[in-house]
Amino acid sequence: MSKAKKYYIFHKPYGVFCAFTNEHGKKDLSRVIDVPRDVYPVGRLDENSEGLLLLTNDKAVNHQLLNPQFQHKRSYLVQLEGQIDKTALKQLEKGVVISISGKPYTTLPCKITKTNVKKLPPCKQRIDFEKSKGTSAVKLTLHEGKNRQVRKMCAAVGFPVVRLIRTKIEQLHLADLPAGDSKKLSRPVFYRSLNLTTV
């Protein structure tokens, strides 16, 4: 008899390692969210990234969300060191060369707009950046999800990431879900919101 499928969205806080195993003494998911033992994260957010994380025990979700051929949209709020300009925005929009597994990779075109830093949600952690440069912020939507892609893209045009928050995957979004909180969803809502094909 198959186990019941479970689906959650979680607002991963800053400084949490994206796994349920303790690695090198880091704070991991098991210390901030209580879900059944067979549930695991789909995709990853690096330790110092925040925002929307999907958790499930439905293995069919993994294939559709992580396979580039399906081109699921992922949206981010990104705080950058320095005042990003139109030239850099156009470069990011068209695609830039980054390193993936030690090889050059040109990112697919993305949608990017400048936004107000004040629109970012509060963060309890201290965020370091060069004070003389100040910071700026962008909304960025990708159709791919390479390892640390947003950080690498922004660094490639000269604006290192200070803070990174994933706000949306397809039609699933954080909305007003506080950092550290989770929400259980039904299978139909989860699949429909992510444009997944049922099998």
Image: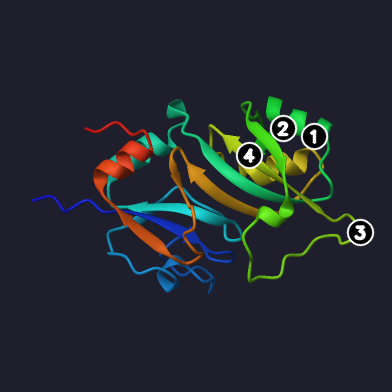
Q: Which dot marks residue 140?
A: 4
147 versus 73 height, above or below: below
Q: CA distance from mark 4 to mark 1?
A: 13 Å
Look at mark 2 in the image and give the residue it sits on: 92
Look at mark 3 in the image and give the residue it sits on: 132
- SS for tag 3? loop
Q: CA distance from mark 2 to mark 4?
A: 9 Å
**Residue 79 rendering spot, x and y as whole percentages:** 71, 52
Dot 2: few (<14), some (14–19), or many (≥20) neighbours within 10 Å? many
Look at mark 1 in the image and give the residue it sits on: 88
> Which of the two labelled residues, at mark 4 and mark 1, occupies the earlier sequence position?
1
> Which of the two labelled residues, at mark 2 and mark 4, occupies the earlier sequence position?
2
Q: Is residue 183 shown left or right of residue 23? A: left
* Residue type at the position of mark 2: Leu
Q: Which dot marks residue 159?
A: none
CB-based contact (under 8 Å), mark 2 and mark 1: yes
* Residue type at the position of mark 1: Ala
Viewer-proximal residue among 110 and 107: 110
State whether residue 153 appears in this view: yes
Viewer-proximal residue among 3 and 164: 164
CB-based contact (under 8 Å), mark 2 and mark 4: yes
| Front: mark 2 or 4 | 4
**Residue 95 rendering spot, x and y as whole percentages:** 69, 28
* Residue type at the position of mark 3: Ser
Dot 3: few (<14), some (14–19), or many (≥20) neighbours within 10 Å? few
